[in-house]
Amino acid sequence: MTTRDIVTAYYAAFNAGDTDAMLALVAEDVRHDVNQGAPRHGKALFAEFNTHMTRCYRERLTDMVVFAEGDRAAAEFTVNGTYLATDDGQPEASGQTYVLPAGAFLSVNDAGLIDRITTYYNLADWLKQVGA
């Protein structure tokens, strides 16, 4: 599979809510850089993050465009979400919906697994949309 195919499969698994399929596409030593906060290193921490996100948010990505060159990719998309359960340090959740433009940068190792995921979105916009 090409880098583009791997990244496309990863986001298809995201949209399907299939975290096992997502995890199957990431390397054991994956580096996960998030918009706010410290990077996570390793598949176990990435799995914990996904469990947390599934509890607090339901999201579907639309308008997906994936660009790839060699072992690197960039994805641009719209996050269509529902805030399900209050996340630590965030406003109280009451089923608020939000729509956010977002992007990500990824890299794929020689084994064909994603070893870096860096995601960006506008936190201030999200806070405004959920009523902060």
Image (tube, rainbow, N blue to C red):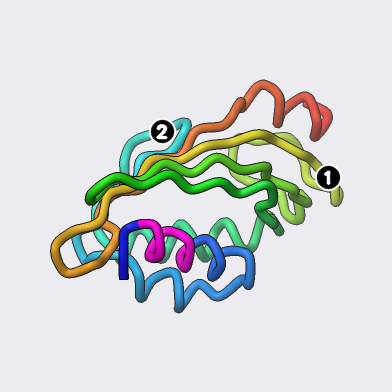
Of residues 14 and 124, the one drawn nearer to the viewer in this rendering: 14
Q: Residue at x 52, y 37 (%)?
A: 103
Magenta stretch: helix, strand or loop mostly: helix
Label 2 SS: loop
Tell me which label, 1 or 2, sits earlier in the chain: 2
Q: Residue at x 36, y 47 (%)?
A: 68
Are there few (<14), some (14-19), or many (20+) residues within 10 Å of tag 1?
some
Bounds of the magenta segment: 4-10
Compared across the picture, whether 52 is left or right of 126 comes to: left
Label 1 SS: strand
Q: Residue furthest top?
A: 124
Of residues 114 and 6, the one drawn nearer to the viewer in this rendering: 6
Q: Which label is found at residue 97?
A: 1
Query: Looking at numbered disc 1 in the image, what kind of residue is underneath it?
Result: Thr
Compared across the picture, whether 112 is left or right of 125 comes to: left
Of residues 72 and 123, the one drawn nearer to the viewer in this rendering: 72
Q: Residue at x 40, y 64 (%)?
A: 5
Q: Residue furthest left?
A: 110
Q: Position of residue 97 (x, y in %)?
A: 83, 45
Residue marked by disc 2: 37
**Residue 109, quarter of the rendered image:** bottom left
As drawn, 51 above or below 129 = below
Query: Looking at numbered disc 2 in the image, what kind of residue is underneath it?
Result: Gly
Q: Position of residue 13 (x, y in %)?
A: 54, 70
Marks 1 and 2 close (CB-CB < 8 Å): no
